[in-house]
Amino acid sequence: MRLGSGAYEGQYSFKSRFESGDGTNPEELIAAAHAGCYSMALSNMLSQAGHPPTSVRTTAAVHLGPVEGGFAITRIDLDTTGEVPGINETEFLKHAEAAKAGCPVSKALSAVEITLNAKLA
């Protein structure tokens, strides 16, 4: 598999998805896209509110599991930490939740439960 941008070229197979093969898989790619999009959305919202972050670090864990008729993505867990000068935790959490709702990838994946663990560094 090769991304159009050339940013990734490598193995993409049954082994990389369900076993311990080299390469990536759809869930890993979705997780990377979701974490990146969410971080951008949160950074933008914080900046627009007058609190530009020093950093926003987000990971996403995409859970694949058996469902009736096969397999499906059953949940996505977002975990984000923000370094944001001049903001309190309550306001940060408000923006974190709004970014989860407003992130384009979150919207595209809205058929799946998306959890959020957000904290200030």
Image (spheres, helix red, strand yellow):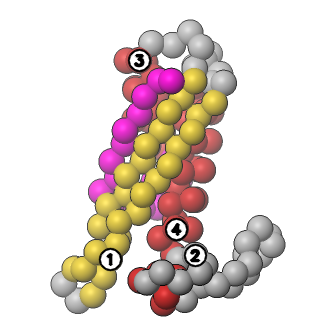
Give x and y (percent) for residue 76: 37, 57
Q: CA distance from mark 1 to mark 3?
A: 34 Å
Q: Residue at x 27, y 87 (%)?
A: 70
The residue tagged 1 is 72
> In this picture, which residue range is highlighted in magenta?
103-121
Q: CA distance from mark 4 to mark 1?
A: 14 Å
Q: Residue at x 53, y 77 (%)?
A: 25
Any mark on residue 24, and which? 2
The type of residue carrying mark 2 is: Thr
The quadrant in which residue 109 appears is: bottom left
Q: Which mark's residue is nearer the viewer, 3 or 2?
A: 2
- On whether residue 112 falls in the magenta region, the answer is yes
Q: Secondary structure at mark 1?
A: strand
Q: CA distance from mark 2 to mark 4?
A: 6 Å
The type of residue carrying mark 3 is: Glu
- The front one of 58 and 107 is 58
Residue 47 visible within the image: no
Quadrant showing the N terminus:
bottom right
Q: CA distance from mark 3 to mark 2?
A: 36 Å
Q: Which mark's residue is nearer the viewer, 3 or 4?
A: 4
Q: Secondary structure at mark 2?
A: loop
Q: Are marks 2 and 4 in contact (CB under 8 Å)?
A: yes
Q: Secondary structure at mark 3?
A: helix
Any mark on residue 89, and which? 3
